[in-house]
Image (cartoon, rainbow, N blue to C red):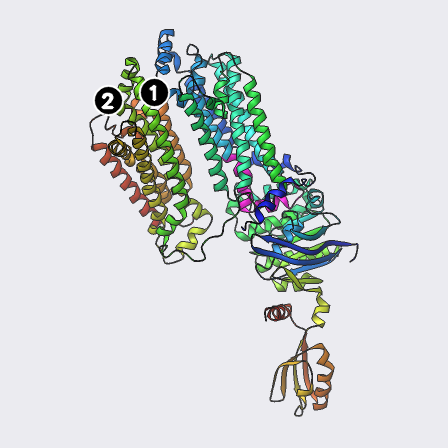
Amino acid sequence: MSATTAPTRLALLTLPAPASSFAGTSTLLRLALRRDRVRIPVWALFAALLTMSVATSWDRLYPTAEDRLGLAASLAADPTLSAILGPLFDPLTTGGLTAWRSGAGMLLTLGLVVSFLVVRHSRADEVEGRGDLILGGPVGHAAPLAAALLSAAALLGLFAVVCAVLLTAVGAGLVGSIAFAFTQALAALVFAAVAGVTAQMARTSRGANGLAGLVVGAAFLITSTGNGQEGGSPLQWLTPFGWAQQTRAYADERWWLLGLSLLVAVGIALVALHIAARRDVGDGLIAQRTGRRTAASWITGPVTLAWRLGRTSLVVWAIAFAVLGAVEGSMLNTSVDLVAKNPGLADVLRKLAGGTTSLEDAFLVTMTGLFGLVAAGYGISTVLRLRSEEEDGRAELLLSGSQTRTSWLMGHGSVALIGSTILLAVGGLSLGAVFGAPGGDVVGQAWRALLATLLSAPAVWLVVAVPLALIGVLPRLAAVVAWVVLVWCVLAGYFGVILGLPDWLTQTSPFGHVPLWPAVPMRWTPVLLLTAATVALLAVALTGLRRRDVPR
Amino acid sequence: MSNDAVIDVHGLIKSFGTTRALDGLDLVVERGETHGFLGPNGAGKTTTLRVLLGMLRADAGSATLLGGDPWTDGVALHSRLAYVPGDVSLWPSLTGGETIDVLGRLRGRVDAARRDRLVNAFALDPSVKVSAYSKGNKQKVALVAALAADVELYVFDEPTDGLDPLMSEVFRDEVAALRAAGRTILLSSHVLAEVDAVCDRISIVRAGRIVESGLLADLRHLQRMSVVAVTSHELHGLEDVTGLHDVSYVDRTLRCTVEPAGLADLLTHLTAAGIVSLESRPPTLEEMFLRYYDQAGA
C-alpha cells in the first residue's frame, strides 16, 4: 500500500456512516446463536462450574479461620502469587477466597473465548466470503459486528447468571456472588469489544485473533506487574483485570467499577462499529503489504512449505515466550528475597517442589511448568493447520503433486514439535538470564533454566502428538480431543490439588511426570517413557494416514 | 441517459493500493433489460458489482443504483435486489435449507412456495449440511436464496460456476422467467454461451473500462459475418471487395469473414459467379469477445 493512501484510509472514518448501518442485526444475532448453540452454553457453564468447584474446596483445604489467616499471611510475603492471582481481600469467607483464587484465570479464559467469538462472527465470515452474501442483502455494514458483540454479551450474561446462582448455592453469599460474576463478565466484555476493533484492523481472522490475544495477555501482565509491587501501584488500575480484582467482591464491593467496565466496553465497541460502518468490505485499517514475486529457493516441498507458513507465527510466539520468561525471571528475584524471610511459606513451597532445599530451585520448577502448557497450546494449534488444509482443500492441492502423505503430515508436525521446543528454550533462557542478572550470573542461571525448561519438552511432544495420531486415524476428532487434553493438563496441574483430585487422576497428565530438576535429583525414566510414547503416536499417525481417505 | 436506468455508473475509479481496478468505468442498465457484463478475470467485474452493492466506496465517479446511492442507502436498496456473489461461501454447520431461510429472513420475508419450487427445480436436498455439499450444490443454495426473492433487480456474479449443464439450463429458464416478468438482471459472466442465450444487452469490460456496450443484436451487426459459398464459375475480383478477411478460395469454395460494409459488394461478386450454395452466420459472442480483446490488446 503506498504512503499516499494511508491518510485517505483514516480520513474515511470521519465521514458520515451510511443509513441504517445496523439493519439486520437481530437476524444475524439469531444466526450467530444458532451456529454457536453448543459452543456458547458449554463455555459459559464450564467457566461457572469450575468457579463453583473452587468455591467448594475451601472448607476442606482451609477449614478453620486460623488456616485461612495463615494462608493470607503467607501470601502477603509472596509477591509472585499475589501478582498472578491478584490481592486477597477477604481470606475468611468462601466467596473471598474463591474470587481471589479463580478471578484472574477465569478472566483470562473468558477474555480469550469472547475475543475469538467476536472475530469468528465478524472478520472470519468476511474473509471466507460469507460477508458478501450477507451484505448483498438489506443488511447494514455494522450489523455483523453488532451481532458478534451481542453474542459475546450473551455468553457472558449466561456465565454471570449461572455463576452467581451456583456460588450463592454453595454458600458464598448472594451480593458478593453477583458482584464477582458480573464484574468478571463485564471485564471480559471489554476484551470482546477490543476484539471488535482488532477485527477492523486486521484483514485476516488469524491476525485479528492474534492482536486480540495480545491485548488480553498484555493486560494480564500489566496488572500482574502492578499487583507484584509492594503497596500496590497505579498499574493495578489500568486494565480490566485490575477493575475486576479491585471490585473487591465479597469484601465491601466497589460497585462503580462494574460501571467503569461497562462504559469502557461500550465505548470501545462504538469505535469498532464506527469503523465497521465506514470501511470497505474486506479492507482493514492495517494496510496490506505486498510480498515476494517468486518463492524462496529453499521452499521445495511440504516440509519446507510448512515452515514458511508457520514462520511468522513461530516468531511471534517466541517473542511472547521471551517476554513471559523475563517477567517470570524478575518475579523470581523478588520472591526469593521475600520468601527467605518467611520460613512457613518457604516450607510449603519446598514441599510443592518435591522436597528441595533450595528456594530458587523450588521457584524455578514451578515457573517453568507454565512454559510447557503454553508451548503445547502452540504445538496443537500448529498441528491443527493440517486439518484446515484438509478441510479447505489445500491438502489435495499438495498431495496431487508428487508428494507423499508422510511428508505432508511431517511438514506441520515438524514445525509443531521443533517449534514448541524452540519456544521452551527461548522462555527458559530469558527467565534464567533475567533472574541471574542482578547476581551477575547471567550465563549460569540461563543455562540452568534452559535445561530445567527443556525437561518438559517430552511432555509437550506427547500432547502435540495426540492430534497428530488422531489426524492419522480419527481426523474429525483431532481438534476437540487435542484441546480437551490440554485443558485437562491445565486442570490437573494447577487445580488438581484445589479440586481434591486423587493423585492417580492428576498423574494422567504427561506434565505430572516431568522431572522437577534441579529442585529434585534427575530421573531419566519418565523422560524416556514420554519420548517413547511420542514416537509410538507418530507411528500411529503415519500408518493411519497412509490407510485412510484424504480428505475425510 | 434515461431516467429509468436501474444502474447508472459514470467514470468509476477504484484503486487498491497501487493497482487501479476500475479506471473510469461507465455502465448503464435500463429497467427490464437482461444485461450481460463480460470480461476476463481481473478486468474489474466483481469490483464494479461490489461498488454497486455498497461494499466498496469508489474513489471517484458516480454510481446510482435503483435511483439511490449504493454506499449511503445500501440497506434500503438491497431490499429491492437479490445478489449471488461469485465466490459463494456458506456456514458449514448449517443445512442448505437453513441457509436459504436465513438469507431470506435477512431480506425480511420468505415466500415458502416459491422457495420450495426452486429447491425442486434445482434438485437440491435442503436437509444436507453445507459442509457436505459439493461446490455446485453450494452454488445452488445461493441461487435459490436469490431467486426466491421477489425483487426488482437480480445481480449474479458468475452464477453457473460449478453447475452442471443441466442445472445451468434450469438457471437460464429461471432468468428467462424473471425477464418475462419485467425484472432487471445484471449477469456478470465469462460463460459466453450463457450470456448469448439470456441477455439483450452486453457491456464488455477490459482493464477497468468498458470497451463496448450495446444491444447484442446491434453489436452482432457491427461485426463480421462468416461466409461459406460455393460458386458454379471461377470467382474474380475478390480483391476489390472491401472489408474481406480470412479469405480462402479452394475448389470454387469461398470461406471468409466480411465486414458489414462489404457484404453487398461480396454478394454481387458471388451472384456473378453463380451461387451454388451460400451459408452465412453472424459472429458468435465468443468471436466478438476475442476480437475486442485482440484489438484492445494490440
**Depth-wise, is mark 1 or mark 2 nearer the camera?**
2
Q: Nearer the viewer, residue A531 or B109?
A: A531
Magenta portion: prevailing SS class: helix
Q: Does residue A78 show up?
A: yes
Residue A297 horizontal/vertical position (percent): 37, 57
Is label 1 in a helix, a strand or a loop? loop
The amino acid type found where label 2 is placed reads: Ser
Tell me what residue is drawn at x 74 percent, y 47 percent.
B68
In the displayed structure, does residue A437 sit left or right of residue B99? left
Residue B129 horizontal/vertical position (percent): 53, 43
Q: Nearer the viewer, residue B215 or B137?
A: B215
In the displayed structure, does residue B270 sit left or right of residue A247? right
Real-space Cα separation, disc 1 to disc 2, in angstroms? 23 Å
Residue A497: give its label.
1
The amino acid type found where label 1 is placed reads: Val
What chain letter is assigned to the residue under label 2? A
Q: Quadrant of residue B231?
A: bottom right
Tell me what residue is drawn at x 60 percent, y 42 percent.
A10
Is label 2 in a helix, a strand or a loop? loop
Q: Are marks 1 and 2 in contact (CB under 8 Å)?
A: no
Height in image: B226 above or below A311?
below
Residue B208 horizontal/vertical position (percent): 62, 59
Query: Disc count in the image?
Result: 2
Q: Residue furthest right?
A: B3
Reply yes or no: does residue A71 show up in magenta. Answer: no
Span highlighted in magenta in the image? A116-140
Q: Does residue B101 show up?
A: no
Residue A358: give its label.
2
